[in-house]
Image (cartoon, grey):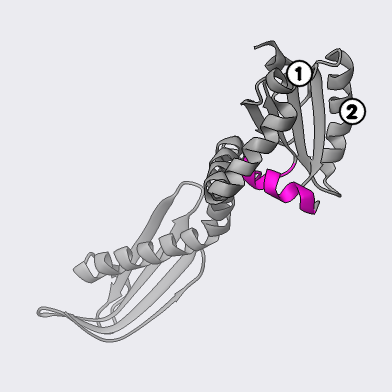
C-alpha cells in the first residue's frame, strides 16, 4: 500500500482525513475521504469511507486503508476523551486518598507514635517511665485517684480549645477519681515526656490506670462521654 499524501483534521467530535493517490495492489484510487464522528453520549464511533478514481464521483469504499484509518482515529478520539476526563479521575483519586487517610488516621498516628517512642533512646524512655511512676502510679504514691488523663496540646490549637469543656465535664462527673493533666508540647519541660509517650500530633489524650499503665490513647476531638467509657474498665 502506498500513500503519496494525506491530511487529517480533527476536533473533539469529528475527524476528516483526505488521502490522495493511494495505491492498494493494482487498484489506484485518486482520493479517499474518511469522515469519522464520535457520539459521546452513546460512546459509539460512526464513520464513512468515500473514494474517487480520477473524475468519478465519490462512492463508498471498503478498503483496508479505511479500516486502518478508522482504528487510528478511534484511538485518537479515545485519547482526547481520556485527557478530558483526567481532571475528574484525579479528583476522584484525591477523594479516595483523603477518605482513606481520614478513616486510618488513628492507626497511622499510633504507628508514628510507636516509632517516635522507639527512637527516643533508652535513657529518655527510662526517665519518662520514672516520671510517670513518681506522679501517676497511685498504688505507690497513695494519691487518691483511680485514673490519669494526660492531654498533650499546643497554643493556638483549635481542637484543643474545643476539648476544654469536655475535660471540665470529665473532672466534674468523675468525682475527683480522674487526675486531668494538660501539657503544652511547646513547653521545654514537656519535651522529654512527649518523646516518652511518642506524641505525634495534638491534641492527643492518654489515659493511665491506677498503676500508671497506658490503657487508652486517641488523637483529635474526643467527647467526654467516650472518655468516661474508658474509666469503667
Residue 227 is situated, as x and y percent measured from the top left of the image, at: 74, 21
Disc 2/disc 1 C-alpha distance (Å): 29 Å
Q: Which residue is mark 1?
A: 142
Comparing 80 with 51, the one in front is: 80
From what the image shows, is residue 96 above or below residue 172?
below
Residue 44 is situated, as x and y percent measured from the top left of the image, at: 41, 51
Q: Is residue 84 visible?
A: yes
Residue 203 picture quarter? top right
Residue 201 colored in magenta in the image:
yes
From what the image shows, is residue 4 above or below residue 150?
below
From what the image shows, is residue 97 above or below residue 166?
below
Residue at horizontal 83 percent and vertical 33 percent from the top: 163
Residue at the bottom extreme, as displayed: 4
Q: Nearer the viewer, mark 2 or mark 1?
A: 1
Lower sequence index among marks 2 and 1: 1
Residue 49 colored in magenta in the image:
no
Residue at horizontal 81 percent and vertical 32 percent from the top: 181
Which disc is residue 89 wearing? none
Q: With 206 as the anchor, is 122 left or right in this view? A: left
Q: With 58 as the anchor, is 217 left or right in this view? A: right
Secondary structure beneath dot 1 equals loop
Residue 150 picture quarter? top right
Our reading of the magenta stretch's main secondary structure is: helix
Q: Which residues are magenta?
A: 188-202
Q: Which residue is mark 2?
A: 165
Comparing 44 with 160, the one in front is: 160
Amino acid at each position: 500500500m502506498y500513500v503519496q499524501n494525506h491530511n487529517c483534521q480533527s476536533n473533539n467530535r469529528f475527524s476528516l482525513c483526505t488521502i490522495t493517490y493511494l495505491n492498494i495492489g493494482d487498484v489506484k484510487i485518486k482520493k479517499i475521504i474518511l469522515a469519522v464522528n464520535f457520539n459521546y453520549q452513546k460512546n459509539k464511533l460512526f464513520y464513512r469511507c468515500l473514494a474517487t478514481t480520477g473524475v468519478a464521483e465519490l462512492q463508498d469504499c471498503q478498503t483496508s486503508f479505511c479500516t486502518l484509518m478508522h482504528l487510528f482515529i478511534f484511538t485518537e478520539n479515545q485519547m482526547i476523551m481520556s485527557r478530558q476526563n483526567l481532571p475528574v479521575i484525579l479528583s476522584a483519586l484525591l477523594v479516595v486518598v483523603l477518605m482513606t487517610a481520614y478513616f486510618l488516621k488513628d492507626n497511622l498516628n499510633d504507628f508514628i507514635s510507636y516509632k517516635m517512642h522507639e527512637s527516643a533512646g533508652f535513657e529518655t524512655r527510662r526517665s519518662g517511665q520514672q516520671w510517670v511512676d513518681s506522679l501517676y502510679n497511685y498504688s505507690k504514691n497513695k494519691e487518691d485517684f483511680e485514673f490519669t488523663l494526660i492531654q498533650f496540646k499546643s497554643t493556638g490549637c483549635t481542637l484543643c480549645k474545643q476539648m476544654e469543656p469536655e475535660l471540665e465535664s470529665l473532672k466534674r462527673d468523675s468525682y475527683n477519681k480522674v487526675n486531668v493533666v494538660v501539657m503544652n508540647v511547646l513547653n521545654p519541660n514537656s519535651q522529654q515526656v512527649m518523646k516518652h509517650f511518642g506524641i505525634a500530633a495534638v491534641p492527643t489524650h492518654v489515659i493511665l490506670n491506677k498503676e500508671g499503665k497506658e490503657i487508652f490513647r486517641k488523637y483529635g476531638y474526643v467527647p467526654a462521654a467516650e472518655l468516661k467509657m474508658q474509666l469503667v474498665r
